[in-house]
Amino acid sequence: MFSTRLGHRRGGNLRQAPRETKFSHGSLLAFERPSFTVDSAKRMNGDELEAVIDQIWDGLLKASSQAEHPWRLPVLGTQGLDGPSVRTMVLRSVDLAARQLITQTDVRSVKLTDFRKDPRVTWLFFDPQTKVQVRAGGRVTVHHDNEFTRASWTAAPGGNKRNYATSLAPGSGSLEQEQAGDAAAAYANFAVLCSEITFIDWLQLGVDHHRRAQFTWTGSDWRGVWVAP
């Protein structure tokens, strides 16, 4: 077991206890597909756990800016009035210091009702080439018509803005697919979802062995442990 604090430079004293290592977090490691696969023949230890959590966040950061990245289109799971629900979202940005995954949605969407019932969410990311799966859980905050959404709206491409200009809410019954309406009024339907991540489950699938680790945010640092796949 180990713990690490995101956003802090590595250094200082290293304390070790049976099955536990404490250290502060340094710069994120470069995300290269071949190196993301941890050698299953190695002994599972705290240093490897540190590398895993570094690479997870580095991969998420890259996915938010690279359209072709396999983690660019994750699945978001919620718990709504009628039970669990999942949908594919676009990962728009990542705030490393706040541990936030950020996406955008229509404020009229049914999932906003889900969040009012239960703000807990789970994100699912999978890379079919490296066979790495990441599940990230936390709570979502909805931003609507505030400083945060205004900045996001300004940065959004024009094509994306038109998606929020329809008069019908997402999922509304319609015999035809409605075309975009007044782009000037679209901002009123625009919302930003910020998920503060407090738990991560990492799974590496292999031909001979699978490996799995879990990371929990303690309030000041990440605490990780190897678990059975």
Image: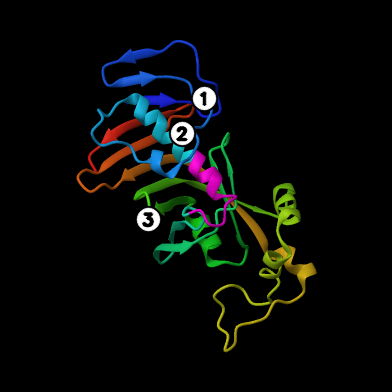
Is 46 placed left or right of 175 in the picture?
Answer: left
Q: Label for residue 54?
A: 2
Q: Is residue 199 magenta?
A: no
Instruction: For residue 223, say whether it is visible.
Output: no
Image quadrant in which you'd find residue 158: bottom right
Residue at (61% x, 73% y) in the render: 169
Q: Which residues are magenta?
A: 58-69
Mark found first going from the N terminus, 2 or 3: 2
Give the amino acid at mark 1.
Gly
Of residues 106 and 205, the one nearer the viewer is 205
For residue 225, above or below residue 24 = below
Of residues 62 and 224, the one nearer the viewer is 62
For residue 105, above or below residue 212 = below
For residue 62, above or below residue 15 = below
Residue 183 % position (x, y): 76, 70
Residue 32 % position (x, y): 46, 41
> Disc 1 on helix, strand or loop?
loop
Of residues 190 and 18, the one nearer the viewer is 18
> Disc 3 on helix, strand or loop?
loop
Q: Is residue 65 magenta?
A: yes
Give the amino acid at mark 2.
Asp
Question: Which residue, given by chain and number where applicable, does mark 3 sit on?
Answer: 128
Q: In front of the other: label 2 or label 3?
A: 3
Is 153 placed left or right of 55 in the picture?
Answer: right
Give the amino acid at mark 3.
Pro
Is 95 placed left or right of 81 in the picture?
Answer: right
